[in-house]
Amino acid sequence: MLPLDKVSLPYEKALRAERFRLIETLESLPDEEFDAGPTLCTAWAPRDVLGHVIGLDYLLSSYLPYRGKINAANQAQADKVRALPRARLMEWARHWAASPSATSRLGAPILLGDLGVHHQDVVRGLGRERRVPDEVATAIFREGLQLSLWLNRRVLRHRLVPTDGHRPVGRGPQVRGTREALGMWLTGRDSVTGELEFA
């Protein structure tokens, strides 16, 4: 049997590619936007979002002291890197993108959606746009379906109809939109509501 570091795991290639796309987005920001610009994670600037997603690789133990309080643990991850100079943080990010941890490689089917949502938090929060790759759009939608079960239960009260290539999900009043917009709405990003059609 090949060792884990010699095996290509499902979604691993897509996860690495999306990490590098996030880095490209962040590197395009002036210092003021990087350090203090708005994102859809209202308490976080782009650098904080990056600190959180990096933390899923390197700071996983930060979840343990919080005993299931995920938001508090996420904030601890962002806080951990808040004082790092931008150049050092971006150097760390490039290593994170090129060399995902074993847990991230194994968890890539889930982490791709989380990463896609947070990339959109930065892009949308700054009023920018990007073309979301097909695999990432599907992962964002899947992340929304999963998170909505405990965040807001929208997935249980609506029939979700992606307009860009996924079968409808659920029952109830219809909500139509792209996989990305539906996924973001399901995770509670209500700023995307204007892009959806409600029946």
Image (cartoon, helix red, strand yellow):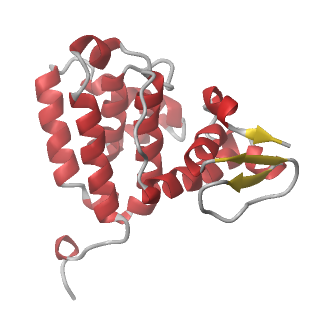
What is the residue that sits farthest to the bottom in this orientation? 1
Q: Quadrant of the N terminus?
A: bottom left
Residue 30's x, y, as percent?
Answer: 23, 16
Q: Position of residue 23 (x, y in %)?
A: 24, 38
Kindly indicate the quadrant of the structure image that contains residue 92.
Answer: top left
**Towards the viewer: 57 or 98:** 98
Q: What quarter of the picture does the C terminus occupy?
A: top right
Q: Quadrant of residue 148?
A: top right
Q: Position of residue 54 (x, y in %)?
A: 29, 40
Residue 2 is left or right of residue 105, and the answer is left
Q: Horizontal placement of 55 versus 185: left or right?
A: left
In the image, residue 96 above or below residue 66: below
Which residue corresponds to the image point at 60% horizontal and 41% vertical from the top-left? 181
Task: Please name the residue shown 51% across and 31% down the image.
Answer: 71
Drawn side of residue 165 relative to residue 87, left or right: right
Q: Residue at x 45, y 36 (%)?
A: 120
**Number of residue marks:** 0
> Residue at the spot x=27%, y=55% of the render?
16
- Give the x, y percent position of residue 79: 33, 22
